[in-house]
Image (tube, helix red, strand yellow):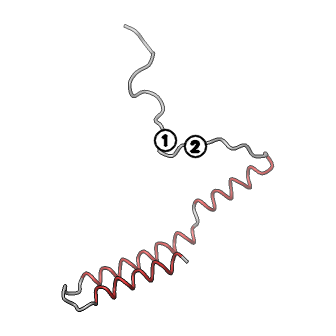
Amino acid sequence: MPRGGKRMGSGRKKSQDPTVTIRVPCSKKELIANWIHQNRFPDDQNRSTKATIGNAIEILNEALRLKANAGGKIKTEIRRVIAVLEKSTL
């Protein structure tokens, strides 16, 4: 019975997001790692985005409660959501 060798499905799986190697001076390694971590996981921006999305969802849920023939009130609520989302991206 043979052992080892190439087998289907074996080995490390390929990542959806390919990587590259970047060479930096050792003296700057920690500085760059901290910068990447801060910009990858910005806590304040994340909280703000969650609040904005929560506000938009609340407005849309209110709009869903309106009757279908509410005379343009639904469009008004949709415009409110768009304004909230636009304000958050500025």
Residue 32 percent across, percent down from the top left: 71, 54
Q: Is residue 75 above or below residue 13?
A: below
> Closer to the camera, 54 or 76?
76
Q: Residue at x 51, y 78 (%)?
A: 88
Residue indicated by mark 1:
15
Q: The disc labelled 2 sits on which kind of residue?
A: Thr
Residue sitting at 49 percent across and 72 percent down? 49
Query: In the image shown, does 5 or 84 lie closer to the viewer?
Result: 84
Q: Secondary structure at mark 2?
A: loop
Instruction: Name the mark on residue 84.
Output: none
Is the Cβ of the residue at disc 1 closer than 8 Å to that at disc 2? yes
Q: Where does the image place residue 31, in percent across and percent down from the top left?
A: 74, 55
Left/right placement of residue 65 relative to residue 52 reads: left
Farthest residue, direction top: 1
Pointer 2 residue:
19
Identity of the residue furthest to the bottom in this view:
71
With 46 as the anchor, is 29 left or right in this view? right
Which residue is at a point 57% across and 72% down the rendered structure image? 44
Determine crowd level at label 2: few under 14, some 14-19, many 20+ residues with C-alpha closer than 10 A.
few
Question: Residue at (34%, 86%) from the top-left corner?
Answer: 77
Q: Secondary structure at mark 1?
A: loop
State how far apart marks 1 and 2 are (Cα). Answer: 8 Å
Q: How many marks are shown on the rendered structure?
A: 2
Q: Residues within 10 Å of mark 1 (few under 14, many from 20)?
A: few
**Nearer to the camera, 87 or 8:** 87
Q: Quadrant of the C terminus?
A: bottom right
| Residue type at tag 1 | Ser
Q: Is residue 59 above or below residue 37?
A: below
Quadrant for the N terminus, please.
top left
Residue 50 falls left or right of residue 26: left
